[in-house]
Image: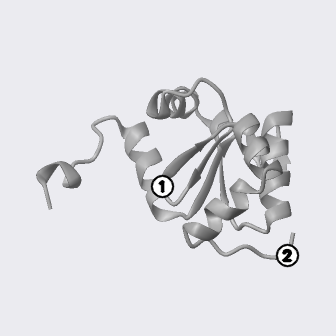
Amino acid sequence: MSDHALETPADPIHAFIAQTVAEHPVVLFMKGTPDAPRCGFSSLAVQILDQLGASFVGVDVLQDDGLRDGIKAFTDWPTIPQLYVKGEFVGGSDIVREMFQAGELGALMVEKGVPLGEG
């Protein structure tokens, strides 16, 4: 194992993001919570994950401006929500919707060992 693998990001926000995506199989950084999304894009992502029957952790970026800006810098992706599966950034709501409609999102989760329930 290289020393690089043991490093944690110096930025505490990036460290929190890295730890969160490492600890949970499916993470949605979103506006609001899964029970009360605060934008249409976040709501769409939650609906898709619910329809797949994927258990996921929602992180409300509106609770902290540093987190809201930090997640965009972490992935170099300008929009929220942002979906991670097994530590890998998948995309925002448009990509998630397109992958879901094509059957690719469920297939990706199965391939990565994420259990899916009845949606």
Residue 11 at what x, y percent from top left? 34, 34
Which quadrant holds residue 82?
top right
- The kind of residue tagged 1 is Gly
- Which mark sits nearer the N-terminus, 1 or 2? 1
Residue 89 at what x, y percent from top left? 53, 45
Point 51% across, 60% down: residue: 86
Residue 99 at what x, y percent from top left? 73, 47
Question: Which is nearer the eye, 112 or 10?
Answer: 112
Q: Are marks 1 and 2 in contact (CB under 8 Å)?
A: no
Say what secondary structure mark 2 lies in: loop
- Local packing at callout 2 (Cα closer than 10 Å; few below 14, some 14-19, many 20+) is few
Identify the residue position indicated by label 2 in the image: 118
Point 66% across, 75% down: residue: 115
Which quadrant holds residue 114?
bottom right
Which quadrant holds residue 13?
top left
- The kind of residue tagged 2 is Glu
Side (left or right) of 49 relative to 61: right
Q: Which of the labelled discs sits on residue 87, or is there none?
A: 1
Locate the N terminus and report the quarter of the image it occupies: bottom left
Side (left or right) of 55 relative to 15: right
Point 70% across, 68% down: residue: 55
Q: Of all residues shown, which one is farthest toward the front?
A: 102
Point 58% across, 30% down: residue: 68
**Res 39 seen here:** no
**Res 106 seen here:** yes
Q: Is residue 36 above or below residue 81?
A: below
Question: Which is nearer the eye, 38 or 118?
Answer: 118
Q: CA distance from mark 1 to mark 2?
A: 23 Å
Question: Which is nearer the eye, 90 or 25?
Answer: 90
Residue 9 at what x, y percent from top left? 30, 41
Say what secondary structure mark 1 lies in: loop
How many numbered dots are placed on residues in this image?
Answer: 2
